[in-house]
């Protein structure tokens, strides 16, 4: 019962079949029909002109930063965003940009603060090169950043002619979570990165979408990063299945996350803000058990339950395709036993 992340999902039998029979060609020459089909499909689903298949979410986000910005530019992002916290400082290491984190509320930056933080003309200032949004917001526990917040920030950005990139690693979870098409979100971003390898269950890859001219430049940056691949249709094929057939299914993960949250909250020493469980991530406060994160996780592991430490006294559980309803019940039984 592996709740560490939705990245642990393995390809389905249908995906394996698609991999085995995928038509391929050299994608650096633009000749892989399966990759081309995935990129067209992703562009259409995300409501953008074009898309680019990239190796990972991190590569998609970093290609976006590199394409939008020049060295010395400033990137505004939320203080607990993935790009700021979890990409190894890539934005400064690779793009040479300065990141400027703004405090968020459940992953949402305050539009007024964003407006204030955008630079005017002054010889002392860096240029404001990019605003990054994230939805769902990972660190706050899979929160859905409200459309209204995205709209407000996007309007400010347009006024100042600063592009907006959306880190939508789990954007389909947000869309399914509020029962809206994914384009309801992407209309408020110039570019978007979506992971195929999380809840959508593909083995590898993300897509980055935007305008045709943006994707042309992004393709060049991907090549510079060593991300120009050859007969890559074998891994694009499961990506097509991910986009076509795995999106609606995410609703089950959300139901299972709620079940898990309610079960955890009923266990002595554990606290969960159940109303805060909006998608497939559950943050559990274990301080009442007087166990360290390491001790707590060791005990769970002895009951075949895996999760990850997220903060001091906070453990993260993620639901996904391989966590069934009965797996949730069994995990809860195991956790109860582990804490006796
Ligand atoms: C997982 C994740 C990424 C990065 O994806 P990788 O494929 O692991 O590089 C980016 N942003 C968010 C919000 C994520 O959750």
Image (cartoon, helix red, strand yellow):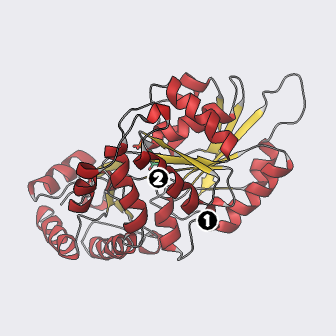
Q: Which of the numbered marks, if any, corresponds to residue 183?
A: 1
- Rendered image quadrant of residue 61: top right
Any part of residue 290 in sight: no
- Asked whether the beta carbons under mark 2 and mark 1 sit within 8 Å of each other, the answer is no
Any part of residue 135 in sight: yes
Q: Nearer the viewer, residue 221 or 319?
A: 221
- Residue at figure coordinates x 36%, y 39% from the top left: 232
Q: Earlier in the sequence, mark 2 or mark 1?
A: 2
Badge 1 crowding class, 10 Å Cα cut-off, few under 14, some 14 to 19, many 20 or more, is some
Task: Report the mark closest to the observer, 2 or 1.
Answer: 2
- Residue at figure coordinates x 30%, y 66% from the top left: 270
Q: Secondary structure at mark 1?
A: helix
Name the residue that disc number 2 marks: 37
Q: Nearer the viewer, residue 339 or 224?
A: 224
Q: Which of the numbered marks, if any, corresponds to residue 333?
A: none
**Left or right: residue 130 compared with residue 92:** right
- For the residue with label 2, is its CB less than 8 Å from the closest atom of ligand 1? no
- Rendered image quadrant of residue 146: bottom right
| Image location (x, y in percent) of residue 297 | 21, 51
- Rendered image quadrant of residue 337: bottom left
| Image location (x, y in percent) of residue 204 | 34, 45
Would you place residue 90 above or below residue 2 in this image? Answer: above
Q: How many marks?
A: 2
Badge 2 crowding class, 10 Å Cα cut-off, few under 14, some 14 to 19, many 20 or more, is some
Looking at the rendered image, the quarter that the C terminus falls into is bottom left
Q: Secondary structure at mark 2?
A: helix
């Amino acid at each position: 019962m592996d709740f560490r992340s939705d990245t642990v999902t393995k390809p389905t039998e249908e995906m394996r079949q698609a991999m085995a029979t995928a038509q391929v060609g050299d994608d650096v020459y633009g000749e892989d029909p399966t990759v081309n089909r995935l990129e067209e499909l992703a562009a259409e689903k995300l409501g953008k002109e074009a898309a680019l298949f990239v190796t990972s979410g991190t590569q998609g986000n970093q290609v976006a930063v590199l394409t939008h910005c020049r060295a010395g530019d400033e990137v505004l992002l939320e203080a607990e965003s993935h790009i700021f916290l979890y990409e190894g400082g890539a934005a400064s290491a690779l793009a040479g940009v300065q990141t400027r984190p703004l405090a968020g509320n459940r992953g949402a930056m305050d539009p007024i603060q964003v407006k204030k933080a955008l630079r005017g003309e002054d010889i002392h200032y860096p240029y404001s090169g990019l605003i990054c949004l994230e939805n769902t917001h990972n660190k706050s526990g899979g929160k859905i950043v409200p459309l209204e917040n995205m709209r407000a920030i996007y309007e400010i950005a347009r006024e100042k002619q600063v592009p907006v990139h959306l880190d939508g690693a789990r954007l389909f979870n947000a869309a399914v979570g509020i029962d809206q098409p994914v384009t309801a979100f992407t209309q408020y971003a110039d570019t978007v990165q979506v992971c195929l390898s999380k809840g959508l269950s593909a083995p590898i890859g993300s897509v980055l979408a935007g305008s045709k001219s943006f994707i042309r430049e992004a393709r060049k940056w991907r090549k510079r990063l060593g991300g120009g691949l050859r007969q890559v249709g074998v891994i694009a094929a499961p990506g097509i299945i991910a986009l076509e057939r795995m999106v609606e299914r995410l609703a089950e993960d959300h139901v299972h996350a709620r079940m898990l949250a309610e079960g955890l909250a009923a266990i002595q020493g554990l606290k969960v803000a159940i109303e805060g469980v909006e998608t497939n991530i559950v943050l559990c406060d274990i301080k009442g058990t007087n166990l360290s994160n390491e001790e707590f996780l060791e005990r769970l592991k002895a009951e075949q339950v895996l999760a990850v430490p997220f903060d001091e006294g906070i453990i993260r559980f993620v639901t996904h395709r391989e966590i069934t309803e009965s797996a949730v019940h069994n995990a809860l039984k195991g956790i109860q036993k582990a804490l006796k």
